[in-house]
Amino acid sequence: MADDDTAYHDYGGRADGPIDRTEHEPSFWEQRVDAILELLGDPRRRLMRLDEFRWMNETMGADDYERLSYYERWVHSVTRLMIHKGVITRDELDARMDEIRHRPETSP
Amino acid sequence: MIAALHEDQLVRVERGVEYGHVRTPGYLRGRHGRILEVVGGFPDPNVLARGGLGLPYRMLYRVAFCARDVWPEYAGSAADEIVADLYEHHLQAREDNDG
């Protein structure tokens, strides 16, 4: 963390110019990411608290934080947290990603 | 849980007291404000962030800052304030004349 107490995620109050207020519809994958977080944090599962998730965003490093889009950061952080907590393993995730990558295209 | 600070008390936001998942924004560190309200005890976010239960609970205060103190170039009214919820261990009580 910087000497002046402000870390890369601490945007508030910074003189960075006007905010882009253009609205956009969240895409399907973004909505799914949102749903995954809701489900992991729900009181019956309690696999994740909001503060744990935010801490992941605050420790991913400035490069990833700047490079990734809003929901890409969410995916990055929730993945790190679930591996860190032992809910999933890196191998399980890699195997599942591989399976999806090789899934035959199906028509809707 | 007993509040060490009270409504209308003048406070300074501490610098460098705590690192990690702290909710006090950087732009308020070192600033002088006035307590509007004692909000109550809440789990410590920095402990929750590491998977703990948030103990010990931290007393939370609603604190007002003069916008022109925070942003010297602020063009709005001199009466405008910014209000933030801040934890007791990030606040230092101060006398009116202690700069």
Image (cartoon, rainbow, N blue to C red):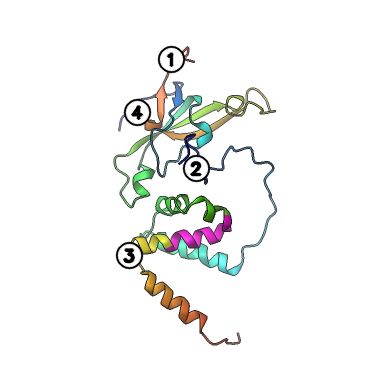
Q: Is residue B48 left or right of residue A12?
A: left
User: Residue at left 58%, top 56%?
Assistant: A67
* Precedes in sequence: disc 1 or disc 4: 4
Label 3: which residue?
Answer: A86
Dot 3, how many residues are within 10 Å of its Cα: few (below 14), some (14-19), or many (20+)?
few
Q: Is residue A106 left or right of residue B11?
A: right
**Disc 1 from disc 4: Cα separation:** 18 Å
Marks 1,4: beta carbons within 8 A? no
Above or below, A77 relative to A19: below
Question: Mark 3 vs mark 4: same chain?
Answer: no
Check the image and name the residue furthest to the top.
Answer: B97
Say if the magenta span includes residue A15.
Answer: no
User: Residue at left 44%, top 30%?
Assistant: B15
Q: Nearer the viewer, mark 3 or mark 4?
A: 3
Quarter placement of the N terminus of chain A: top left
Give the residue type at disc 2.
Ala
Q: Is residue B33 left or right of residue B92?
A: right
User: Residue at left 47%, top 32%?
Assistant: B62
Give the residue type at disc 1.
Glu
Marks 2,1: beta carbons within 8 A? no
Predominant SS along the magenta part: helix
Which type of secondary structure does the marked residue at label 2 adopt? loop
Label 2: which residue?
Answer: A7
Q: Name the subunit of mark 4.
A: B
Which type of secondary structure does the marked residue at label 1 adopt? loop
Label 4: which residue?
Answer: B3
Picture coordinates of residue A78, whole percent (x, y): 44, 61
B91 or A61, which is in the foreground?
A61
**Disc 3 from disc 1: Cα separation:** 50 Å
Which type of secondary structure does the marked residue at label 4 adopt? loop
Picture coordinates of residue B82, whole percent (x, y): 57, 31
